[in-house]
Amino acid sequence: MKKLISIKEPKSPVSESYRGIRTNIEFSNLDEEIKVITVTSSKQNEGKSTVMANLAVSFANLEKKVLILDGDLRNPSVHRMFGVSNARGVTDLLVDNKDFIECVCSTEIKNLHVLTAGKIPPNPSEMLSSKKMRAFVESLKHHYDYIFIDAPPIGIITDAGIISTYSDGCVLVAAAGEADIDMVKMAKERLDKVNANILGVVLNKYKPEGAASDYYNYYYQQEEVAHKGRRAKKKK
């Protein structure tokens, strides 16, 4: 879980940003229930899986029951991020009719479960668009407050578009200084074509400069000093 800054440094500016995104998602939930959230990007290596995992942790910290589902059946990565086995997962549930309890994994984070991809199938798109997959995701709503689906980059393959058709909302991740503007536009167009409910875009890997950076560094350092002071008082 080395990339989960929401766990390692909960008071850092980045963790605060994830809480801000969490709040925005909660407010978008006022008129229509949003429980299944797909996270995708325009291309690989923009950090969508890391963003998705940290968001899930943020929601779990609110005492919400959260499931992370690896929807990238071509190049799964969630199991590596959480250090769990990928021997059984989504594909085993759908193809071999394995029981959900046999496949889902608990994590070190309270209220957070992980369902890995399982064995890589020869027909990922067909599996993701199947009635069985749609019914399965719908059934999860009765057991979890939020389900985060890690989808492949929609700028490369259409799997994320398929997943978004049975999701309540979609988050698009773009890497600062790395994302291709045309590819990001194309990613949005593909989501629009399937009538995906785009909750927003997360600008990942952004590094503030100047006054903003100095302010956040100062704030974080002061919080750390205050925290150490409180711990010292407790020891006395």
Image (tube, rainbow, N blue to C red):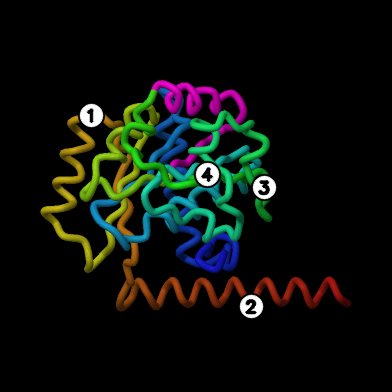
Q: CA distance from mark 3 to mark 2?
A: 34 Å
Q: Which residue is mark 4?
A: 68
Q: Which residue is mark 1?
A: 194
First of labels 4, 2 by sequence position: 4
Q: CA distance from mark 3 to mark 1?
A: 33 Å
Amino acid under disc 4: Ile
Q: In this view of the protein, which residue sits in the foreground, 150 or 60? A: 150
Q: In this view of the protein, which residue sits in the foreground, 42 or 175? A: 42
First of labels 3, 1 by sequence position: 3
The reply to whether the C-beta atoms of the residues labelled 4 and 1 are less than 8 Å apart is no
Residue at position x 69%, y 48% from top? 110
The numbered mark at residue 225 is: 2
Q: Along the horizontal axis of the image, is 76 left or right of 66?
A: left
Give the magenta-colored segment's residue range. Answer: 131-149
Amino acid under disc 3: Ser
First of labels 3, 2 by sequence position: 3
Residue 30 in the image, given as x and y percentages of width and height: 44, 27
The reply to whether the C-beta atoms of the residues labelled 3 and 2 are less than 8 Å apart is no
How packed mark 2 is, by other alpha carbons closer than 10 Å (few <14, some 14-19, many 20 or more), is few
Q: Which residue is mark 3?
A: 106
Amino acid under disc 2: Val
SS for tag 3?
strand
Residue at position x 46%, y 54% from top? 18
First of labels 3, 4 by sequence position: 4
The reply to whether the C-beta atoms of the residues labelled 3 and 1 are less than 8 Å apart is no
First of labels 4, 1 by sequence position: 4
Q: In this view of the protein, which residue sits in the foreground, 233 or 121? A: 121
Residue 218 in the image, given as x and y percentages of width and height: 48, 77
Q: CA distance from mark 3 to mark 4?
A: 10 Å
